[in-house]
Image (cartoon, grey):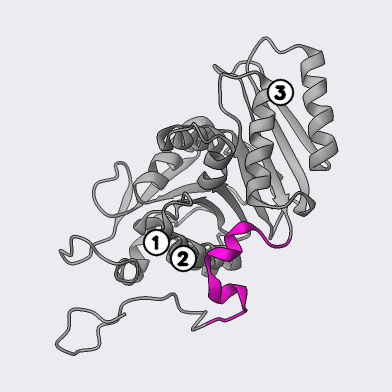
Amino acid sequence: MDLRIRAPVLLAGIGGAGSRMAALMSEASGIDHVSIGRGDLGGRQARIGTGGVVNPSVRLLRAAACGAEDQIEEMMEGYGTVVMVANLAGKDGAAIAPVVSGICSRTGRGPVSIAVMPFGYEGARLFEAGIALRRLREGSDATIVIDNDSMMQSNPDLAPEQCYDIADSAARHLACSLGSLAEGGTGILAAGRAGRDAEESLRDALRTLYGSAPPGSVRRSLLYVMGGGLSAGAIGRITEVAGGMLGGGGLHVDPAASESGVVVLSAVQGATKFDGYDPLGAIGQELDWDVPECSIDCGLQMYQME
């Protein structure tokens, strides 16, 4: 069943990277956006303070976000659905996104969660990202994952900044098609490099997709083809190849786009590579699942306890 988006919609960017991506999606779609995180992120913002701690842990940041729940909820007043964008490789995204997701779920505003996962070499961040993603999937009407690691594995010559650019471009196209998502499901957003032949870009996107989830898990896909000068034959070949591998879905062709490329949004079912990021989750262990893991003030002569 397709997801029901209740208007008006609010884009909520978590942290610096999430706020930048939400702003790009807002520019493409005209949807309002806000930022949630530390520092000055620009525009309308709920600022999370950590009491002067320069390098807070994820759990200390999460505790600070819990203390700002009223401010975050006030920013959402008047909106029917919140689309949350978070880079789970960053501390702000991993810490704050589960708190925002809980607020949205409790107040009946969704959410739809868009999560950017870390590169494989960011080993220390994989565990926290895996836990945060599990919480988002549990509390969201739909979850879309952008996997930087699979993008780099399929194109090993890419620099990290190029992966960020591809993810930003893919998210801009997603902003106009939120109602086509599967309710309660998990989606993988994969993209080929812009400026390449469309069929080659499709192969890039498929390698990225199948680096995150096994082929048999794909249930339905939306295909976006951008760039002018594409012949009807080229579009037909792309549709034929994608249709045979990605199941039923839809096709959107944007001949007015400044660069050519292909973006694939696929609904998947079953295990993905991200389940391995959280070893406890893999064996079904859940500790205090209703309450996100936070630092606590225990009244002892210690700054914090985790």
Q: Amino acid at mark 1?
A: Ala
Q: Observer-nearest residue: 201 or 294?
A: 201
Mark 3, residue position: 199
User: Real-space Cα distance between discs 3 and 1?
Assistant: 36 Å
User: Real-space Cα distance between discs 1 and 2?
Assistant: 7 Å
169 sits to left or right of 35 = right
Q: Amino acid at mark 3?
A: Glu
Which residues are drawn in magenta? 270-286
Q: Amino acid at mark 2?
A: Phe
Q: Observer-nearest residue: 229 or 46?
A: 229
Residue that appears at 51% across and 45% down: 148
Badge 3, how many Cα within 10 Å: few under 14, some, many 20+?
Answer: some
Mark 2, residue position: 127
Above or below for 173 versus 304: above
Q: Observer-nearest residue: 110 or 76?
A: 110
Q: Position of residue 9 (x, y in %)?
A: 54, 47
56 sits to left or right of 273 = left
Mark 1, residue position: 124
Q: Which mark is residue 261?
A: none
Q: Position of residue 231 (x, y in %)?
A: 76, 11
Query: Which quarter of the image is occupied by the C terminus?
Result: bottom left
Q: Position of residue 207 (x, y in %)?
A: 66, 39
Residue 186 part of the magenta-drawn span: no
Badge 2, how many Cα within 10 Å: few under 14, some, many 20+?
Answer: many
Q: Position of residue 66 (x, y in %)?
A: 35, 71
> Which picture quadrant has residue 88?
bottom left
